[in-house]
Every structure is written in C-alpha cells, then in structure tokens.
Amino acid sequence: MLSQRWVRVVGSAVGITGIASAISFVSTGLLYRLLPVEQAGTLALLFTLTETLILVGGLGQQSLIIRLYSRQPVGAYDWRHDLRLVTVVTLPLIGLCVLAAAVLYRFDALAILFLLVAAPMSAFLLNAGQVLNSQGLYGWGNVILRLPRGLLVIPALVMLAVPALQRIEIAIAAQVITFGLAGAITWALLKSRIGRGDLIMTLREIPQGLIFVASISSNLIADQVLGAVAGLRVPAAEFAALAAFTLMFNPFQVVQNVFSKVLVPEFARQDTTRLKRVIVISGIVCALFVLAAAVLMPIAAHVVFGGRYDWAAFLIVPLALANAFDLAEVIPRSYLMGKASGPVLNRFIGLQVGIALIGLAVGIPLIVSFGIIGVTTASAVIFALRLVVSYAVFLRHFHSR
C-alpha cells in the first residue's frame, strides 16, 4: 500500500535528518546564545541572506533536477555533468547577488567573504541533495543540506568552553571551513552511492527552472525576503530575537522539508488514490502543533537561550500559525509538482506569484510600522493564502482525473 510505503520512507528520512538537524540546532542555538546580541543578529542576517541568494540566483535548478530525475529510472542521469552545468550557469548570477547584498547592507570584508563562500556552496549542496532525493536516498539528501551548520557544533562548543573566542569573526571563519568540508563529503557520497547514467540535462532545459522559482516565490517571500527586508529596518538585537524564535521552530521545518522532498518523487512514481486519510491526519497534527507551541515554546526558548530573548515571546503565535499552514500545504503542493500537467502547473504557479506579490504588498508596510512582529504576521498571512490556493487547485485536479 502507498500509505505504508510513505510511512516507511518518510519515517526513515525524518529519523536520519532529525539527528543532523538536532546537531545543527545545537550549534546555531549556541551561537545565538553566546555571541554578543548585536553580533548574533548580524550572523543571523548573513544566514538569512545566504538562503535568499541561492533561491534567487539558483534559477530553480534544484526543483528542475528532482522533476527531471524523478521521471526516469534510478541512475538514468549523469549527475556529474548536470551538477557542473548547473554550477557554471548559476555561479555568475549568485556572485552578482552577493555583490548587491554587500552594497545594500554595507557589509565589511569578513561578511562579504562569508557570502562569497556560503552562497555558491549552499547552492551546490542544495542541488546535490536533490540528486540524492530523486534517487530515493532521502536521508542523505536532507543530511548534506545541514552539514555546514552541523559541523559548526565543534567550534560552537569550543566557544562555550573559551569565552574569549565568543566573537563573530571566529564564527564566520569556522563556517567557511565547514562549507569546504561539507562540499568534499558530499562529492564523495555522490561518487560512492550513485552511478552515472546516459541522460544529461541540456542548456536548453535550464530556463525551465525559472518556473519553479515562480512556484516558490510565495515561500521565498515568507521565509527569506521579508527577513532580509527586516534586516535593513530593525536593530541587530531585534533581528537576533526573530532568528532565535524562528530557530525554535526548526524541528517542524525539518518535517515539512523532508515530506516535500520525499512526496514529489513518490507522487510522480506511485499511485495516489489513497490520500484522504493522510490529509485528515495532517490537519489534526497541524492543529495540535499550534496548541503545543503556544504552551511549550516560551519555556523551551527560555531554557535554550538563557532568557536572552524572552521579551520577544509575542512572536510565537504567528510563527506557529505560519509553520502549521506550511506543513498542511505539503500534500497538495507535492502532488501538483509531481503529477500535474503543464497547464495545471502553470496556473498553480501563476497563483503563487500572485500570493508573493500580495505578501510583499502587505509585508513591507507591516515591517516598517511594527518591526519583527510585522515579519511573522505577514508570513502567517502568506502561508494561509498558499494553503487555500493549493487545496483549491489540488482538489479540482484530483477529482477531474
């Protein structure tokens, strides 16, 4: 049964990814707790910008890879050729994005160095992870995305033991090194686990990735762009608080990310007639999640950050709602990405672009007027709209088959 396969595949991926994410959570949490609060805010902004730059400058190639690869038997594509091609095409644009960010935010040389390393390396890891996911190696595909931050746990623990090292310069230098290590580990993993097929991605196919940039535009606005805008408007100490509470919801983002990466290829290859039970269960889980977060998150955040960000606990409810809506949308979105026809997918993506524009129109004034609470409120609104639109398109397509 499909549902049993999902439980087995998703459970394995969540378990492996959960360990890597827990280590990443510890390393990032320690940095947000140990660094001077203004420096913690600056580091958090660099993390946010890295994620934004690779999604904009990456031209949607990570989604194109998984869509193309999932429609062929395992091992059909020459992954070495494809990763080289994607890197050559996207690297100049990512570099321009880094330059623009350096000018806009007036970063110093060390911050620019961080972005010059972190952005292209993150893009490579994202694309390589999708190659692994498309071949059914879901655990590894999700783990390598978290390797750079996970490996950062060692220098973070050293900082904990040696207070004199609790400086952003040390954190950035350590992160640059861990990106290099993560890249080497990922290449070795690809060589050992995936053969080289005869099919290759072509330069003519690269522009197809742009449609996937449009498809994630609303997600990009809610998760990264609004945060980047806030980085221009709010003090570093407030941005650190926003990043800290966002980090507290990271375990739920892990579940969402794993489900989405597993379900797109599974929907593409498997029968999808038994979805009602999965949809009902996901709705119940999301409702319980919001209630649990409202009760437990203030206590958990106090323990993790030593009370440093308790004053910003008002961020919890909108963050919980945004994450719940995001998780609930995984099923219809993954179904459409994996099985929808071209016209249906184009219509769906057009709606996503509309939501992104609404998100910007609502979010920027909220940030200007209310600061970090404006970010989380706008994010919750965007994810609520996404959920409604995704299910509307999904139900129409599913019942018309």
Image (cartoon, grey):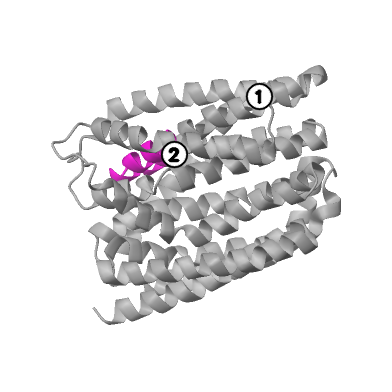
- Nearest the viewer among 3 and 341 is 341
For badge 1, the amino acid type reads: Ala
Whether residue 197 is situated above or below residue 392 in the rendered picture: above
- Residue 289 visible in the shown view: no
Compare marks 1 and 2 and give the one earlier in the sequence. Answer: 2
- Residue under the point 35% across and 27% down: 189
Which residue is tagged 2?
A: 93
Quadrant where the image shows the C terminus: bottom left
- Residue under the point 27% across and 71% down: 343
Which residue is tagged 1?
A: 109
Quadrant where the image shows the N terminus: bottom left
- Nearest the viewer among 386 and 300 is 386
Q: Position of residue 67 (x, y in %)?
A: 29, 52
Task: Answer few, some or many: residues within 10 Å of disc 1's Cα (few below 14, many 20 plus, some between 14 and 19).
Answer: few
- Residue 395 visible in the shown view: yes
Q: What residue range appears in magenta?
A: 124-141
Task: Answer few, some or many: residues within 10 Å of disc 2's Cα (few below 14, many 20 plus, some between 14 and 19).
Answer: some
For badge 2, the amino acid type reads: Leu
- Furthest-left residue in view? 198
